[in-house]
């Protein structure tokens, strides 16, 4: 039998070490995917209005926080992709969400390049930014984008986007710079959401690698020296493995249908879980549910990238601009007959007034 490589000496060690030691990245790894209660269109409208009522804008010019965050998100996504490719090369079982990420990673890289191209240095400093809250210092429009993604599970379309922005503006008017920034901040928020999901997938992959290693140890012991099983289980206990759903599910799956002596490590796992009020069966179900949810979220986010590329953003800005609505009241109709560039100059001039 060929044993799985000890994860302590595998390429995944680099990412695991960074996840554990990098304070900044550890803070990121605790962030959950942008996935909360799914809202209907009417609920999104109400949420947008509530968001506008609680947003406070800092009158002091802010810093450029979006580019550094994009760079960190890109670095993490690249490392997770490397980890998943390593798993494929090792013929390990790959979760559906991981397959989605690998198959569409070219699209993610394309979106990152596009974001860099459309986000020049200092661009976000010109936008109204948040005074308080988790995103204090970030552009207000970025928080709006994240909230929309949060309550649509990353599935953005033209209708939900327009209604969300229109509803927000019934309370607080967004300036033209913010409306033009919607496309870029949505792209950035989707990239960030994929990073959040990717980190969770990476944690699960690392835990599965570890479970595979220990499963190989106990299976080999059962086949060659069953009397030493208690010693191997003691080694497993001393290693203090993570009792995550990914670790438990993979370990249990590998030992399923094997010899009777393998009930010893499973009993130990069950006892550890019972202290937390859990069972192996519950952890397996939790792992399956998480894999399913992550697959849906990744698919939604990738689909939203395609929406961003097909959207007519000139039409969106004109359709949501409060200034545009006012200028269209021109009784003579001169404004509506101007070309887009001229109308845009008029809008900016009126906004400055």
Image: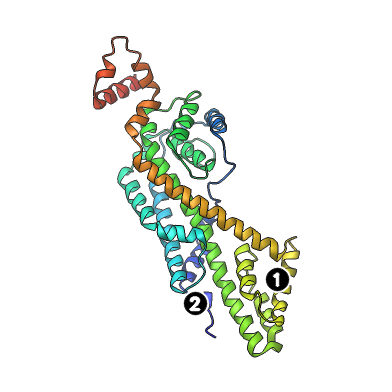
Which residue is at 62% across, 71% downward?
A: 253
Position in image of residue 147 (x %, y %) = 51, 39
Q: Indicate the quadrant containing the C terminus: top left, top right, bottom left or bottom right.
A: top left
Pointer 1: what residue?
A: 269
249 vs 182, nearest the viewer: 249
Vertical position of residue 272 compared to residue 295: above or below: below
Which residue is at 46% across, 61% downward?
A: 99
Q: Indicate the quadrant containing the N terminus: top left, top right, bottom left or bottom right.
A: bottom right
Q: Residue furthest top?
A: 331
Which residue is at 57% across, 74% downward?
A: 212
Of discs 1 and 2, which sits in the foreground? Answer: 1
Vertical position of residue 200 compared to residue 8: above or below: above
Pointer 2: what residue?
A: 9
Position in image of residue 23 (x %, y %) = 52, 58
| Distance from Cα at disc 1 to Cα at disc 2 | 24 Å
Residue 237: image quadrant is bottom right
Position in image of residue 110 (x %, y %) = 34, 52
């Amino acid at each position: 039998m060929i044993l799985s490589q000890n994860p302590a000496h595998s390429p995944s060690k680099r990412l695991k070490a960074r996840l554990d030691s990098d304070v900044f990245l550890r803070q990121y790894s605790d962030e959950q995917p942008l996935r909360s209660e799914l809202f209907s269109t009417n609920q999104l409208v109400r949420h947008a209005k509530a968001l506008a009522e609680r947003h406070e804008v800092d009158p002091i010019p802010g810093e450029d926080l979006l580019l550094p965050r994009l760079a960190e998100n890109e670095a993490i996504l690249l490392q997770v992709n490397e980890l998943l490719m390593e798993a494929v090369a090792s013929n390990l079982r790959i979760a559906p969400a991981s397959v989605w990420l690998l198959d569409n990673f070219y699209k993610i890289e394309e979106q990152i390049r596009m974001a860099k191209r459309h986000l020049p240095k200092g661009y976000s400093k010109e936008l109204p930014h948040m005074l308080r809250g988790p995103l204090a210092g970030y552009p207000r429009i970025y928080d709006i984008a994240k909230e929309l993604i949060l309550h649509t599970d990353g599935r953005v379309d033209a209708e939900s986007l327009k209604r969300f922005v229109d509803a927000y503006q019934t309370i607080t008017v967004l300036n033209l710079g913010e409306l033009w920034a919607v496309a870029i901040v949505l792209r950035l928020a989707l990239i960030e959401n994929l990073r959040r999901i990717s980190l969770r997938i990476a944690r699960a992959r690392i835990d599965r690698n570890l479970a595979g290693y220990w499963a190989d140890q106990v299976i080999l012991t059962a086949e060659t020296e069953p009397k030493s099983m208690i010693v191997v289980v003691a080694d497993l206990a001393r290693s203090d493995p993570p009792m995550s759903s990914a670790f438990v599910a993979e370990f249990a799956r590998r030992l399923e249908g094997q010899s009777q002596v393998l009930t010893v490590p499973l009993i130990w796992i069950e006892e550890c879980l019972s202290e937390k009020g859990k069972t192996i069966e519950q952890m397996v179900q939790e792992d399956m549910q998480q894999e399913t949810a992550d697959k849906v979220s990744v698919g939604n986010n990738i689909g939203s990238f395609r929406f961003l590329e097909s959207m007519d953003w000139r039409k969106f800005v004109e359709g949501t601009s409060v200034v545009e609505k006012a200028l269209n009241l021109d009784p003579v109709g001169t404004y509506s007959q101007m070309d887009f560039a001229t109308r845009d100059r008029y809008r900016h001039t009126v906004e400055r007034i």
